[in-house]
Image: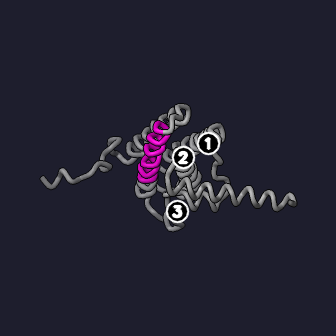
Amino acid sequence: MTEQATIESKFAAEQKQADADHHKPTAGAMTNHVLSNHAILNTKLHQIQWFVKGPNAENYKAVLSQVIYENYEWFDKIAEQLLDEGEIPSSTTDEYKEYTMLEEHGENKYLDADEMLETIVQDLVTDNMFVTRAIKLAEKEDRPAFQELLVEMYGWNNHQIRVFQGLLGKTATEGLEDDDDDDE
């Protein structure tokens, strides 16, 4: 077997396993969703940083710079933990696009500043759905180091939600809970 054939067969086996893991979710597969979410989140944070306008734009850019830096660190921590756990982290743009649950839109650069920040809040809320699922799966699979990192990631996401909500003049959870109670 040639070296190229070996590489192709290894990648094919990886893809087959990833497909199986996503159909019957594992902590690794769910965490790959989180990794992909943070890859796309990075792009979205940059888009906002580059295009945000208005009287608070410079303040927003400073916050965004810090969040981008921290998000890069989280991206690497998540990938390293996947590797430590014997998993294969997504490593291509195609994989990130396939596994993310966040959406990118070129039109977002034309939103007003508040609408831009609201997209980040919603992205972090969406990511937390995957983080909490990954935590439960890591616990079920008895992977305490995995679980610990994911719990820490959940805390970081929640902090960022609070920061961005504060920039929007809201409390940490304002507008994020189910509003069904209003009907009573």
SS majority, magenta:
helix
Q: Secondary structure at mark 2?
A: helix
Give the magenta-colored segment's residue range: 121-140
Query: What x and y, as percent, mark residue 147?
Result: 50, 35
Instruction: State the SS at label 3.
Output: loop
Residue type, mark 1 in image: Leu
Instruction: In the displayed orientation, state which residue is furthest to the right.
Output: 2
Q: Earlier in the sequence, mark 3 or mark 1?
A: 1
- Residue at point 68% right, 57% down? 13
Which residue has dot 3 on it?
104
Mark 2 surroundings: few (<14), some (14-19) or many (≥20) residues within 10 A: many
In this view, which residue lies farthest toward the front? 1
Q: Which residue is mark 2?
A: 31
* Residue 134: x %, y % from top left: 48, 44
Q: Quadrant of the N terminus?
A: bottom right
Q: Position of residue 41 (x, y in %)?
A: 54, 52
Disc 2 versus disc 3: distance between alpha carbons? 20 Å
* Residue at figure coordinates x 43%, y 52% from the top left: 126
The residue drawn where x is 33% and y is 43% is 173
Residue 110 in the image: above or below residue 169: below
**How far separated are the C-alphas under marks 2 and 1?**
8 Å
Q: Are marks 2 and 1 in contact (CB under 8 Å)?
A: yes
Identified by mark 2, the residue type is: Thr
Question: Where on the picture, by quarter, is residue 85?
Answer: top right
Eye-nearest disc, 3 or 1: 1
Q: Point out residue 174 in the picture as x, y percentages from the top left corner.
A: 30, 46
Task: Give the camera-side residue of 39 and 143.
Answer: 143
Which residue bears the numbered disc 1? 82
Whether residue 49 is visible to the viewer of this picture, yes or no, is no
